[in-house]
Amino acid sequence: MRTVRPIALAVLLLAPLPARGQSATATRILVMQAEGRRAPTTAEIGLLRINTRSANADTAKVAVRALGRLERASLIPDLLPALRHALAEVRIEAADAIATAAQGSGASATADSVVASTQNALLARLAVEADPGVRGALHEALARLPYRNAAAALKTETALLAGGRAATALPERLGIARALETFVRIHGDVRPPGSDVIELLRQLARPESVAPGLDLLRDARVRRLANEALLSVGGLDEDGVRRAAEDADPQVRRLAMRAIEATGVALEKTNDGLVDPSPLVRIDALRALRIRGGDAICPAARKAATDSDLNVALVALDQLAVCRTDTEAVELLARIAADTAAIAVARGWHQHAHALVALATAAPDRARPLLAAYVTAPIWQVRGYAARAAAQMAERPVLDTLAHDTEDRVANAALAALGAPLRARPPLKPSPAPAVSANEIRRLAAPRARIVVRDVGRIELALFTAEAPGTVVRFVRLAEEGYYNGLSFDRLLPNAVAQGGDTGPETAVFPGREVGTWPHVRGAVGAAAPDTNDAQFFINLVDNPRFDHQYTVFAQVLNGADVVERLLEGDVIDSITILP
């Protein structure tokens, strides 16, 4: 029999092992609690290590995920055996956890050797792995390792090229696409992507590349990711833009408009984008037209200012700021900005405030007489737009007034324009990670949350308790305490995110990051601030792969996607109800 090292034996003896007959659920709760505390003791590390080898697949997954989230490269050897687990779902979790743990390798002299040994272990597993989903996860893990030299990056690039050329099953194609998007985005400074990588991405971006038996719409995420990657490295050529602009998937067509904005190729395709049935495409088509200059953007934006989708109309009004010499555009902005009757109405002020800011650039003499009504508006967001307009026109007396506004966000907009120190926001109070109790886990085994947005409708979320237990428990507690009632979606970025839940100085906080395998796709709900951990959350309005492994995903929109599409800045959350 092997001799057990004293330190290892001590860990085994000290670890809070499940009592005889204790349920798997109780064991998982111990693991979640240890993760929430960041496993500060050798006993808790031992608990996580032991349970990565649990015969119960759910327990093994939770333990593997928890061990990886500690971001300690020294724990990678404890995760590697899980790559050989009998169940593919555990092997997928292990690949992701290993890549997450490797982020803790730091910049020490041994960092390169840690990354190299991890890379070799993942490549060795890839050589014998048969499951397409696990192969995709292994490719993603390889792409995420923190390479610091071109030779190591080239080794992974070679593996991604080989995998991408051979992949036919959707799970592996998706994993390859996610891996390539990540790889070119985060390692471009270490090793710029070669021509072979660009060609593989172009192949994945083509609808005709879908393997026999795969559905074109189900493969859409592969094409989105490939186009995202090409866009980030300037690899979308004219043929690629034309193909993307004619794709069946609206998010792919949207990316074509973004490529036109960045490169100017296939510029005439913006005309199709302006009349696309999807608002997502129309928004980015308007933005793309900016490169043509006022002669193109002004007539199109004037027409789009009456779009049936209000978010499209607001983007159109913003674009009219460049239309100084377009009499019709200036008159349109002046007419809308002068109609101040609706700026005290919760869902009535947006067009008027956007028009004011655009008018402040296009025709400041027309905007100045209108400022006073906006400065005294009861809705603070309207006063915030007044600060932006006043800054554009260098209206110092107005800025001085707004610098004393009762709402910090209005005052700081004015102070920033004046070049004065901003109001300091009190630091968030430390908040320990919520202790996850057995009763809560049982109650929240498959929970939903119903968000009622005033005058808009209901959004129903599926909460991911197993994947992000600390965040879900905290969100549920805050919701049930009524914390979110009356708060608003204070930040809405079209074709990006809708963010809400901020109360100012007394903001509640979430626990630390709980990143995992669920991606930031359209409708995914994330915790907004991984550094300050405040209790804001955001809903992805489009796929945002750059957020993957950066922001916790703790829910997904189940019902009410149409309500999400209609959200406007300042929309009020009447209530959030938890439905176990």
Image (cartoon, grey):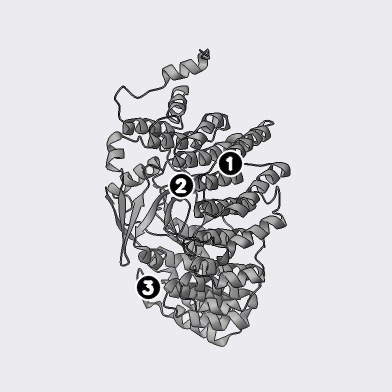
Q: Which type of secondary structure does the marked residue at label 3 adopt?
A: loop
Instruction: Quote the CA–CA distance across marks 2 and 3.
Output: 33 Å
The residue at which mark 3 appears reads as 348
Q: Which type of secondary structure does the marked residue at label 2 adopt?
A: loop
- The answer to whether any part of residue 450 appears in the image is yes
Q: Which type of secondary structure does the marked residue at label 1 adopt?
A: helix
- Amino acid type at circle 3 is Gly
- Amino acid type at circle 1 is Leu
Q: Residue furthest front?
A: 212
Which is closer to the viewer, label 2 or label 3?
2
308 and 461: which is toward the camera: 461
Is residue 143 placed above or below 234 in the rendered structure? above
* Residue 407 falls in image quadrant: bottom left
Q: Earlier in the sequence, mark 2 or mark 3?
A: 3
The residue at which mark 2 appears reads as 552
| Mark 1 Cα-neighbour bin, 10 Å: few <14, some 14–19, many ≥20 | many
Instruction: Quote the CA–CA distance across marks 3 and 1.
Output: 56 Å
- Percent of width and height locating residue 570: 39, 63
Is residue 258 placed above or below 339 in the rendered structure? above
The residue at which mark 1 appears reads as 126
Q: Earlier in the sequence, mark 3 or mark 1?
A: 1
